[in-house]
Amino acid sequence: MQTSQITTGWDEYRRALRPTDQLVFDRLFEYAQLHTDPSTVHKPLFVETPILISMLLEQQIQIDDLEERLDHLEDDLNGQG
């Protein structure tokens, strides 16, 4: 299943996001592609789904920030040795 098929119906939500958040949003749906088999047995979307997607989006932003900070710290430590 292609990412574009998975994101069908989410275009308006995606457009409302900041451009940097759109990239994270796209990556989350790329992750969803890795689990398409279990998602085929999932019931139709619930009202809460956009809220959950927003939570996941913010979580991914925070993870990305922490990874970037860790990379900088590792670079600083390696430069000192």
Image (cartoon, rainbow, N blue to C red):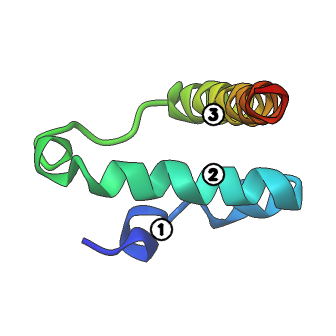
Residue that label 3 marks: 60
Q: Amino acid at mark 2?
A: Phe
Camera-side residue: 76 or 30? 76
Image side of residue 31 versus residue 74, left or right: left
Question: Residue 47: which disc?
Answer: none
Residue that label 1 marks: 8
Q: Amino acid at mark 1?
A: Thr
- Say whether disc 2 or disc 1 marks the residue closer to the N-terminus: 1
What element does badge 3 sit on? helix
Residue that label 2 marks: 25
Q: Amino acid at mark 3?
A: Gln
User: Is 59 located above or below residue 43 in the figure?
Assistant: above
Camera-side residue: 81 or 73? 81
Between disc 2 and disc 3, the foreground one is 3
Alpha carbon of mark 2 to alpha carbon of mark 1: how far? Answer: 13 Å
Which residue lies at the image location 48% right of the left edge and 63% below the top edge? 7
Residue 4 image position (x, y, % from top left): 45, 75
Between disc 2 and disc 1, the foreground one is 2
Between disc 1 and disc 3, the foreground one is 3
The reply to whether callout 2 and callout 3 are in contact (CB within 8 Å) is no
User: Is 51 located above or below residue 28 in the figure?
Assistant: above
Camera-side residue: 45 or 6? 6
Residue 9 image position (x, y, % from top left): 52, 62
Image side of residue 21 versus residue 2, left or right: right
Alpha carbon of mark 2 to alpha carbon of mark 3: how far? Answer: 9 Å
Q: Dot 1: within a 10 Å radius of its alpha carbon, few (fewer than 14), some, or many (20 or more) residues?
A: few
Q: Dot 2: within a 10 Å radius of its alpha carbon, few (fewer than 14), some, or many (20 or more) residues?
A: many
Farthest residue to the right: give it.
18
What element does badge 2 sit on? helix
